[in-house]
Amino acid sequence: MIYDYQTKNISFIKMYKELKELGIQNNKFHLILYDKDLLGVDPYDSNLSLEMQAKIYKECIINYWYYAREVVRIPTPAGSCMYELHRGNLATSFTQLLNINSIEILPRQHYKTYSAVCFYSWMYLFVAKNYNIAFSNKQLEDSQLNIKRLNDLIDLLPSYLKSHMDPKYDTNNINLLRIASNNNTIKALSTGKDKVSADRLGKLKSFLRPKTFLCPV
C-alpha cells in the first residue's frame, strides 16, 4: 500500500494538507493506493490494456477512496467533474466504511446527495452482493430523482467497469434498480406519515432483510 500524492484530484491533496495542519496524524488515508502500477494512470484512457483495466477494476473493489478520487465523475450542467472532497463528506464516508451510523448536516450546495450517491454506487456496483438499498425521502419524486442521479453517475463510468451489467437481465426504472449478476437492488421510497404506513410502505418485515441500507438521501 502506498499514498498517491500525484493524484490530479486537487481536493484530495488539499484535504491531506488541511488535516496535517490541524495536527491529525491519520491525515492521508484518503490517498491510499494498493496497486502502485496505477500511479498516474487515467481510468478514462481509451488505450488502456486489458490488464490495466483489470487492475483498475480490482482497485475499485477494494479501495473506495480510489473510486471516489480517480474514477467517479459528477454530472453538472457544464459537463462532468471529479468528486470534490471536503471535511463533511470525508467524515461521512469514513464512518460508512467502518459501518458506524452517522447524520450529516451541511449547508446547501455542499454535495450531500452526490456524495451519498457516489458511496452507494460503489457498493451497488463493486462490493455488495444480495443487498437491498432503500432510497428514502420526504416525497417519492425526490427518491426517484436520486435514483436518476445514481444512474447518471453510473452512465459516466468507463464501460469496462460496468461489464457485469446486462440490460437483458437487469432492472432499471425510476423506482427500482437491480443488477442480476450480484443481485443488488436499490428501491425508491417516500416517507410514511406514521409507523403503520411506514411499515407498509417499506415492507419492513419482508423487503428489508438484514443486508439492507436505508438511505435518506
Image: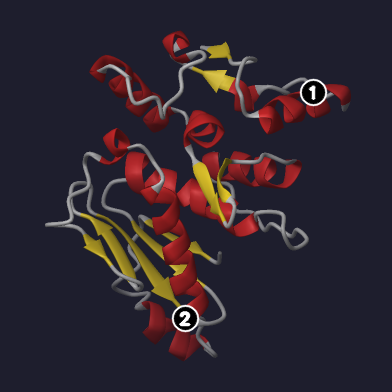
The quarter holding residue 19 reads top right
Element class at badge 2: helix
Q: Report which residue position mark 2 lands on.
A: 140
- Residue shown at 28% from the left, 46% from the top: 129
Residue 24 appears left or right of 143:
right
Q: Position of residue 39 (x, y in %)?
A: 50, 13
- Name the residue located 22 percent from the left edge and 39 percent from the top edge: 163
Residue extending farthest right: 22
The mark total stands at 2
Q: Judge by depth and name the residue closer to the eye, 31 or 7.
A: 7
Q: Position of residue 49 (x, y in %)?
A: 28, 16
Q: Compared with residue 22, is residue 120 higher up or lower down, i.e. above or below?
A: below
**Picture disc at residue 17:** 1
- List the single residue furthest toward the front: 78
Q: Amino acid type of disc 2?
A: Leu
Q: Which of pointers 2 and 1 lies earlier in the amino acid sequence? A: 1
Above or below residue 101? Residue 47 is above
| Mark seen at residue 34 | none
Q: In the drawing, does residue 145 fall left or right of residue 17?
A: left
